[in-house]
């Protein structure tokens, strides 16, 4: 699976202040979802933080601990930080930019990736990563994929709304931000969700093979390892309402078969 995902927020503060906050590793857990700790493990070539810096992050994804090391490849404060992974479960390339805006600063994160699997330090940085969720130091006033709480998500809000309309009558269904997108849970168990332009469907291990025979489907391998019981359906395969309804129903049936959480 190849990804190239960007998310942005307009923050009502000057670029210097936004960048100072966002690029301070002590704020990683607030700025980047799922990151729990971030430690400076290698100083920049000129000392301190900058090009050549090594930052070790510990994140949790699907209940798994993920340790990875990012090396700074470009640092132009307060406008740019570019990093590639040099160790970890998968290669990835992360770019932060901070540009002046009429209402403050446009803060943007871009994650690029490709077929990578387990990270190999000797391989070129053809990056993949779970960093698909960005939250700014202040609530954004406007920009792409903004939730009511001010969190900027990288997912198709139009597809999410179509799902929401179909599941709204069910009082047992709740929403939660997961997988760098949004998930719809039945009694606490995920049924379906949206990540990027794709529909995530939890069909269960026994029905995965049959589900993958349907048009527009592929394995769910955001962590670099296929997840049994989960599939992705391309948004381009969901233009017909009855097709979307069928996938939502499959996910809801499996989720409802699990014990409530």
Image (cartoon, rainbow, N blue to C red):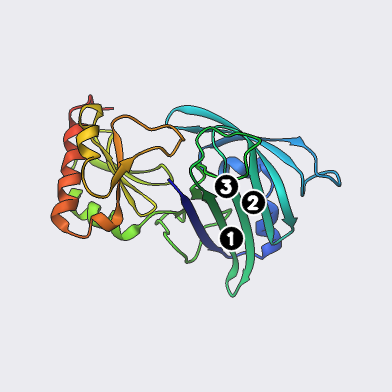
Residue 219 location, x and y as percent?
34, 38
Q: Quadrant of residue 75?
A: bottom right
From what the image shows, is residue 6 above or below residue 26? below
State the CA–CA distance, disc 1 to disc 2. 9 Å
x 17%, y 39%: residue: 250
Counting other residues with Cα less than 10 Å from the Cα at mark 3, is it few (<14), some (14-19), or many (20 or more)? many
Q: Secondary structure at mark 1?
A: strand
Q: CA distance from mark 3 to mark 2?
A: 6 Å
Evaluate whether residue 172 shows in this view. no
Decide: marks 1, 2 in contact (CB < 8 A)?
A: yes
What's the CA distance linking mark 1 and mark 3?
Answer: 11 Å
SS class, disc 3: helix
Which x, y percent locates residue 103? 57, 72
> Which residue is at 24% across, 30% downward?
204
Q: Residue at x 50, y 35 (%)?
A: 117
The residue carrying mark 3 is 31
Please, is residue 141 above or below residue 155 in the view? Answer: below
| Residue 222, quarter of the rendered image | top left
Point out the tag, 3 or 2, that comes first from the N-terminus. Answer: 2
Residue 66 in the image: state x and y as whole percent.
Answer: 54, 30
Q: Indicate which disc residue 107 carries.
A: 1
User: On the picture, is 47 further left or further right than 179?
Assistant: right
Q: Are marks 3 and 2 in contact (CB under 8 Å)?
A: yes
Q: Residue furthest front?
A: 123
Question: Furthest-left residue in view?
Answer: 242
Pick the quarter of the image with the N terminus: top left
The tag on residue 189 is none
Left/right placement of residue 160 relative to residue 27 reads: left
Q: Earlier in the sequence, mark 1 or mark 3?
A: 3
- Work out whether residue 130 or residue 124 is closer to the camera in this orientation and state it: 124
Label 2 sits on residue? 22
């Amino acid at each position: 699976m190849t990804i190239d995902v960007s998310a942005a927020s307009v923050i009502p503060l000057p670029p210097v202040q936004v960048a100072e906050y966002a690029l301070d590793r002590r704020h990683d857990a607030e700025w980047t979802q799922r990151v729990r700790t971030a430690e400076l493990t290698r100083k920049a070539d000129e000392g301190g933080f900058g090009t050549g810096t090594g930052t070790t992050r510990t994140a949790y994804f699907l209940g798994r601990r993920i340790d990875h090391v990012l090396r700074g490849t470009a640092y132009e404060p307060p406008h740019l930080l570019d990093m590639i992974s040099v160790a970890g479960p998968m290669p990835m390339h992360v770019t932060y930019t901070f540009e002046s805006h009429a209402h403050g600063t446009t803060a943007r994160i871009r994650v690029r990736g490709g077929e990578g699997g387990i990270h190999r330090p000797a391989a070129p940085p053809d990056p993949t990563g779970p960093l698909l969720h960005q939250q700014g130091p202040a609530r954004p006033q406007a920009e792409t994929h903004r939730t009511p709480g001010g969190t900027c998500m990288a997912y198709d809000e139009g597809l999410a709304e179509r799902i929401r309309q179909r599941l709204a009558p069910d009082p047992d269904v709740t929403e939660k931000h997961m997988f760098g997108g949004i998930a719809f849970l039945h009694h606490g168990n995920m049924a379906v969700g949206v990540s990027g332009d794709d529909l995530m469907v939890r069909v269960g291990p026994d029905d995965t093979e049959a589900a993958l025979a349907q048009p527009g489907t592929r394995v769910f391998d955001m962590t670099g390892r296929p997840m049994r019981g989960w599939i992705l359906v391309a948004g381009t395969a969901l233009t017909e309402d009855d097709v979307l309804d069928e996938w939502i129903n499959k996910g809801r049936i499996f989720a409802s078969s699990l014990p409530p959480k």
